[in-house]
Image (cartoon, rainbow, N blue to C red):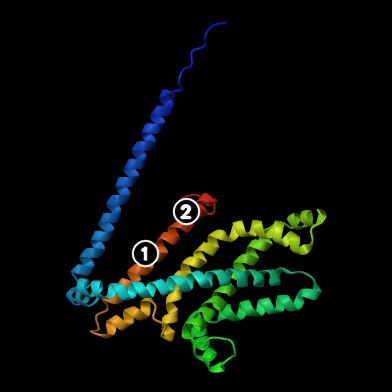
Amino acid sequence: MTDQVDTAWEPSPVQRERDTWRRRRTVRSAVVAAGSTVLALGAVAVVVVSSPGWERVQQTYFDWDKAVDSFPAVLEGLWLNIRVMALCAVLIVALSLTIAVMRTVRGPVAFPLRLVGTAYVDVFRGLPLLLVIFLLGYGGPALSLSGLPTSALFWGCTALVLSYSAYVAEVFRAGIESVHPSQRLAGRSLGLSYGQTLRRVVLPQAWRRVLPPLMNDLVSLQKDSGLIAALGVIDAIRAAQIETASDFNYTPYVVAGFLFCCLTIPMARLTDRYARKKGYHGAGGHL
């Protein structure tokens, strides 16, 4: 037998030429994108800085010393927003999934469940979130219900949960109804009950399909958690308002906005990355 010599694979000249062209195109695209971005931001900066009221705006909204002084209080308030968001997110998932299941149950016997679920979704999707916060934040403690807290934080969180659950329930319902009926029939043919089929066959598939829009709702919840400041809860926005009231310098609001962006932008980018990984973006191609 003749000895066989193992040789490492090498790309062909055509493949090397293609790789070189792709690298050049990538570098050129990056340079063009960076140049256009610098020009656009530079034009905006020139317009803003050259405006007649820029000095007054700079003193009122971009005072560095005021930002440093107010940063600890605003950051402490943001920690409350984070805790509110985390707790409400768990409750929203549980309540909205229950409502979605109620709306997808078939049969005349389950009509009251579908009616209640539909009424809930219609009412809380029709009411503005801020209005729900006012109604529950001021009306809830006045009821003096036994066993329920009277704090504004509790009722503000309740308003967030009730309002967001109506939207998230529709996301879950769309995911449940997107599962092909043959999946349900296959589960029932294997001897699974309706509840077992829903839990073991339908919901796992629906969850994977609705995870990107659920992550988008979480990003929105991160921002809207600041609305509880309307009830006097000292979160990031309320802390910024307190800091502003001392000298009417609005830099603390800019600090609060910056901290919210630091919280929401990474989550938004993670959502987009996950959606692209699962093939939810780019299905329509490029123009």
Residue 181 drawn above or below residue 23: below
Q: Is residue 230 left or right of residue 140?
A: left
Number of residues whose C-alpha sits closer than 10 Å to that of mark 2, classed few (under 14), some (14–19) or many (20 or more):
some
Q: Earlier along the polypeptide chain: callout 1 or callout 2?
A: 1
- From the image, which quarter does the N terminus lie in? top right
The reply to whether discs 1 and 2 touch (Cβ–Cβ < 8 Å) is: no
Q: Position of residue 181 (x, y in %)?
A: 74, 58
Which residue in the protein does label 1 denote?
A: 262
> For the residue labelled by badge 1, is the local secondary structure a helix, a strand or a loop?
helix
In the displayed orientation, state which residue is furthest to the top: 1
Name the image quarter holding residue 46.
Answer: bottom left
Looking at the picture, tell me which residue is in the foreground, 29 or 168.
Answer: 168
Q: Is residue 275 left or right of residue 66?
A: right
Q: Residue at x 51, y 62 (%)?
A: 215
For the residues marked 1 and 2, what is the alpha-carbon distance in whole angstroms?
17 Å
Which residue in the protein does label 2 denote?
A: 273
Tag in front: 1 or 2:
1
Q: Position of residue 136 (x, y in %)?
A: 53, 86
Q: Position of residue 48 (x, y in %)?
A: 23, 69
Residue 54 drawn above or below residue 195: below
Looking at numbered disc 2 in the image, what kind of residue is underneath it?
Answer: Arg
Looking at numbered disc 1 in the image, what kind of residue is underneath it?
Answer: Cys
Looking at the picture, tell me which residue is in the foreground, 241 or 87.
Answer: 87
Name the image quarter holding residue 96.
Answer: bottom right
How many numbered callouts?
A: 2
Q: Residue at x 33, y 41 (%)?
A: 27
